[in-house]
Image (cartoon, rainbow, N blue to C red):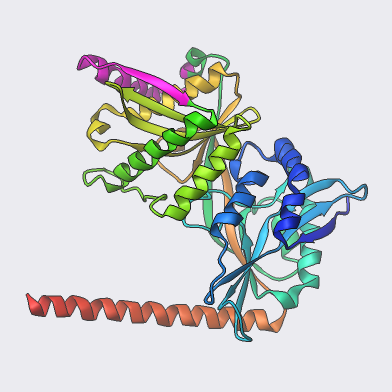
Amino acid sequence: MRLSVEQVDTAEGLHALGPEWRALAARVGQGLPFATWEWNVTWWRHFQERRRSVRDHLRVLALRSADGALRAVAPLMLTERPGSGPLRFRVLQFLGADPNVTELRGLLCAPELEAPAFAAVTRHLRAHASEWDWILWSGLDLQGPAAGELSRMSPLTPLHEVPAYVLELAPTWEAFKAGRSRNIKESLRKCYNSLKRDGLSFTFQVARTPEEVAPALTTFFQLHQARAQAQDAGVRHRDVFSSAQARDFLAALCQELARQDAVRVFQLCIGGAVVATRVGFVLGDTLYLYYSGYLPRWSDYSVMTTTVAESLQYAIAQGLKSAHLSSGRDVSKLRCPRELHRHDAVQLSPEWRGRVAFATYRKVRELLSNEQLQGWARRTLARRAGD
């Protein structure tokens, strides 16, 4: 199948693409909230840069078959640094280029159409190579056809792997537990028994309507921050929603998706108070478990493990087939039966300007890094001298 490319570079065009994008994501989005039209259009509204130092431009590529049907979407944007002038770095990257809010990014298409989709994208980008200096690719399966098709334009340099994990759910909770390892079974037993041993009981509630989700997210932001600020945690966690920008984005997104019954905010309550919470998205037959939060003083009771266990029981009871445990490696996820291997990569424009711009950019970054390091050393020495 040979696909044609329609470039969407206005907000009006992005909104007009909505109905087709929604239908495509429902068919081939693999239960990822980041693949939805709602995520991308809300992200653009909240995170696009329009400053003198940096400016973003929509460059979404809609890939269509000969009958005009939408077969794939490459939700790209062009970022210019600085925002104007002849001396600019021009970088193509995916919508969702934020500090950890968007966990997984990439081309939206059916697996069997990856080869013609990337072939079409390559033809389009090569034809417009004078308009960009390099591309930051996300979500590439380097064992699939993407690498071969893209390499026809210019060399592709992998940057790092972005792992993600998926659990296949059984028809019942008991059947699901029976398929777990001995360590997982013991972990589940301990998290429930530790509360019972101290005479504590919990309730588990699920916010899903727009009216329920709004206050549940307020609690989520508080507990997510508390988790990040915990001083005695074995693993340090970033407060992904420390900025009002990130909080406003998630609140707006969840209101939209809650109207489609696609949001679940799971809450574990003890003594009438929420002690642990996790945001989830239900798309098709998949539960995507997003970020979490909990009160550190309850960590000895493994309340986060209990919350995940209760969330999985909920998913099984709802007839869902799989649970996506999001990106990033940790010990519990490494016990999952299915791991997705995706890579970020950089690719320079075949035009000479791309090579020069990228080399200059790296040199500037190196100089700035050295200056920052030297500045830190000077400040540290000055403080010591003052002591």
Q: Check the image and report above or below for 60 versus 25.
A: below
Q: Residue at x 60, y 85 (%)?
A: 87
Q: From the viewer's perspective, is 69 left or right of 178?
A: right
x, y percentage for residue 296?
26, 37
How many numbered marks appear?
0
x, y percentage for residue 9?
73, 63
Q: Check the image and report above or below for 307 versus 94.
A: above
Which one is in front, 206 or 379?
206
Majority SS type along the magenta span: helix
Q: Which quadrant would residue 235 be assigned to in this image?
A: top left
Q: Which residues are magenta?
A: 177-206
Q: Which quadrant would residue 123 be assigned to in this image?
A: bottom right
Q: Is residue 195 magenta?
A: yes
Which one is in front, 110 or 81?
81
x, y percentage for residue 361?
53, 79
Which one is in front, 169 or 41?
41
Q: Check the image and report above or below for 48 versus 357.
A: above
Q: Residue at x 57, y 69 (%)?
A: 50
x, y percentage for residue 141?
64, 51
Q: Residue at x 64, y 51 (%)?
A: 41
Q: Which quadrant would residue 255 be assigned to in this image?
A: top right
- One can see residue 128 in this view: yes
Q: From the viewer's perspective, is 191 left or right of 102?
A: left
Q: Is residue 266 magenta?
A: no
